[in-house]
């Protein structure tokens, strides 16, 4: 067995845990961001995260994730992954793409007030294996939203959330 395989085998195995994903009410952040919120719980644990979300809304003066004002947040185990959609228009071809940008906030769960530290893990481009089911769902929801831009499509996007158990 290689050293890499030994390190992975000897580390805490998150794959043995069921992950419960629960959507929360949409949150408005500064600069007119609308954010879908997801809580992830491991092995059925439950906790009230409303104070964390409220504190994030106060702490983040500039979400700086995308230029559409549409985002989602994944909240789990002392970190929040705030991911926003940015419309990118190619200067060469003039075509448009939606790009997902994210920022990670970490905090001490025992002392939430004033304890946010942005970027402790990284400020962009990282998701844990458990978050990828939510990211995949949100990618599809954004594609559906962009294809159907009409009077009700924003509400449809806000209502289109992932909920359930991620099994490994």
Image: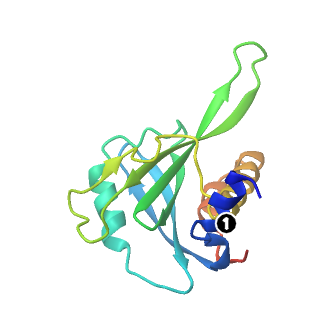
Q: Residue furthest top?
A: 92
Q: Nearer the viewer, residue 163 or 68?
A: 163
Horizontal relation, residue 138 to residue 110: left or right: right
Chosen colour scheme: rainbow
- Image coordinates for residue 41, horizontal then vertical, percent: 52, 77
Q: Is residue 86 above or below residue 103?
A: above
The image quadrant that residue 167 belongs to is bottom right
For mark 1, give the secondary structure: helix
Horizontal relation, residue 16 to residue 31: left or right: right
Residue at 23% across / 67% down in the picture? 111
Q: Residues within 10 Å of mark 1 (few under 14, many from 20)?
A: few
- Image coordinates for residue 112, horizontal then vertical, percent: 26, 65
Residue for badge 1: 9
Q: Nearer the viewer, residue 40 or 141?
A: 40
Q: Nearer the viewer, residue 37 or 159?
A: 37
Is residue 92 in sight in this rendering? yes
Is residue 160 in sight in this rendering? no
- Image coordinates for residue 118, horizontal then vertical, percent: 36, 46
Residue at 52% across / 35% down in the picture? 67
Q: Is residue 161 above or below residue 135?
A: below
Q: Quadrant of the N terminus?
A: bottom right
């Amino acid at each position: 067995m290689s050293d890499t395989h030994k390190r992975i085998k000897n580390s805490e195995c998150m794959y043995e845990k069921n992950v419960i994903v629960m959507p929360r009410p949409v949150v408005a952040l500064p600069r007119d961001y609308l954010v879908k919120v997801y809580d992830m719980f491991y092995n059925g644990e439950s906790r009230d995260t409303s104070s964390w979300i409220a504190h994030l809304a106060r702490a983040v003066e500039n979400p700086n994730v995308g230029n559409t004002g549409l985002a989602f947040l994944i909240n789990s185990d002392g970190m929040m992954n705030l991911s926003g959609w940015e419309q990118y228009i190619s200067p060469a071809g003039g075509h448009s793409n939606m790009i997902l940008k994210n920022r990670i906030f970490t905090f001490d769960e025992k002392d939430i007030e004033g304890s946010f530290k942005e970027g402790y893990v990284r400020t962009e481009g990282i998701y844990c294996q458990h978050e990828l089911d939510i990211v995949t769902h949100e990618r599809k929801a954004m594609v559906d939203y962009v294809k159907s831009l009409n009077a009700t499509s924003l509400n449809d996007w806000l209502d289109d959330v992932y909920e359930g158990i991620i099994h490994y």
